[in-house]
Image: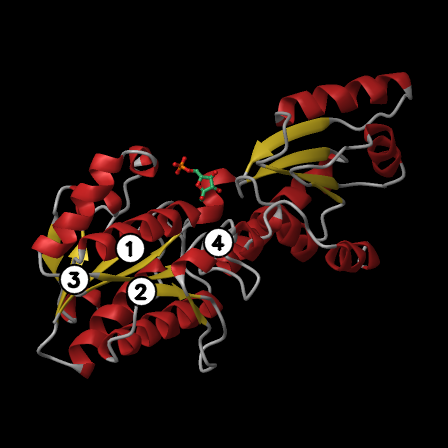
Amino acid sequence: MKFGVLTGGGDSPGMNAFIRAVVRSTINLKSSTSIWGVIDGWAGLRDSNFRKMTKRETAGIGHSGGTVLGTLRVPELKDNVDMQEGIALNLHDNFFDYLLLIGGNGSLAAAAVLDKIIKEKGYRTKILVTSGSIDNDVCNKYGFSVGFYSAIDKSLEMLEWIRDTASAHRRVYIVKSMGRESGYLPFFAGISSGAEHVILPNEDVNFEQLATLISERDRDTRIIVSEGYHHFVEEIRATLEKIFEKRSIKNEIRTVDMGYFQRGGKAEVKDILLASWLGYSMVKHAFEYGDSGFFTTYNAGQQPTFIPLEKAIDSNETNNMQVSQQLLDFANALM
Ligand code: F6P
């Protein structure tokens, strides 16, 4: 048999642990099976750019951030039917029995389209997908995606650095967080770091109330802003400064973007274990000749939940914008 392994979308810590687990499980469980890395993600699949993987080249990568295979974004893949059909044919012509992939919601959507084409045309390849994304916006009702905990960890560290300087200067820091249209990363970064407020993507912000909260604090205030919120951090700053002037609130405001720093660096232990267990489980599934599908996240050692790709892309399986009332109550109780 022949397997391919692909990392797609934005890199997330834990992708290398996934690659390592897939490569090693494949070779250790059935040495007659070859495992090929797809270079640069979807671009590599489009261009048939593959490299045969060995156990040796996955040594020592389990904890490292980014992805050793690379991941280039190919936005045209979403709507370009010729490209989709070309990729499905590439997989077939290169004799891949399974493609094992970890990525975000764009990668899951692409996998579902390719799987449909492959089945219609009678091609050989099956596609197994799991979620790797700092945004936690991929079929997330079963568990958090690979990389999510690591990104919270990085955010926490940065927010503590900001606290030092905010406290020293009695300042307000408006801190932008990645997360695309999903509020999960900023929200959980806020809970972990004890930030004073998190502006969620769809929030109707009460700025007067926010100014009151700031004025009642003695020293540092950190306000996290979700990437999906419809105003820039500088606009938020200007709005608050106007209110401060009117109400004679003296605190200075600064803005800062945690952005790409949240995505990088060493993977957190939970992500390493989760990614490794998912990789191993997917390889076992492939050796049992299972169909294409999505592996939801869960804890290492527990039974995986395996669902069809059509179900995984269903919007009911993903909660993007709304942080539940239960979680909001939790956050408020910690204020
Ligand atoms: O999807 C992961 C993510 O980091 C988002 O949070 C962010 O909006 C996006 O990727 C940035 O993508 P790029 O690396 O293409 O700028």
Task: Tell me the residue at 85%/41% (across/down).
Answer: 218
Residue 122 sits above or below residue 165 on the image: below
Amino acid on which disc 1 is placed: Asp
Residue placed most toward the observer, 211 or 323: 323
Give the distance between the C-alpha atoms of the residues marked 2 and 4, in whole angstroms. 17 Å
SS at badge 4: loop
Q: CA distance from mark 2 to mark 1?
A: 7 Å
Of the 4 image quadrants, the one containing the N terminus is: bottom left
Q: Residue at x 27, y 40 (%)?
A: 72
Q: Amino acid at mark 2?
A: Ser
In three-dimensional space, the C-alpha distance between marks 4 and 3, rounded to whole angstroms, equals 26 Å
Say whether marks 1 and 3 touch (CB < 8 Å).
no
Q: Which quadrant of the rendered structure holds the C terminus? A: bottom right
Q: Nearer the viewer, residue 202 or 159?
A: 202
The earlier-in-sequence mark between 2 and 4 is 4
Residue that carries the numbered disc 2 in the rendered image: 292
Q: Specify whether 134 is left or right of 196.
A: left
Residue indicated by mark 4: 138
Q: Is mark 4 within 8 Å of ligand 1?
A: no
- Tell me, yes or no, whether the two marked residues, 2 and 1, touch with CB atoms within 8 Å: yes
Task: Point out the tag, 1 or 4, that comes first from the N-terminus.
Answer: 1
On residue 124, the disc is: 3
Q: Nearer the viewer, mark 4 or mark 3?
A: 3
Image-quadrant location for residue 284: bottom left
Other-residue count near label 2 (Cα within 10 Å), few / some / many at <14 / 14–19 / ≥20 = many
Q: Tag 3 or tag 1, which sits nearer the N-term?
A: 1
Q: Nearer the viewer, residue 166 or 10?
A: 10
Residue at label 1? 115
Residue 106 falls in which quadrant of the image?
A: top left
Determine crowd level at label 1: few under 14, some 14-19, many 20+ residues with C-alpha closer than 10 A.
Answer: many
| Left or right relative to 174: residue 82 | left
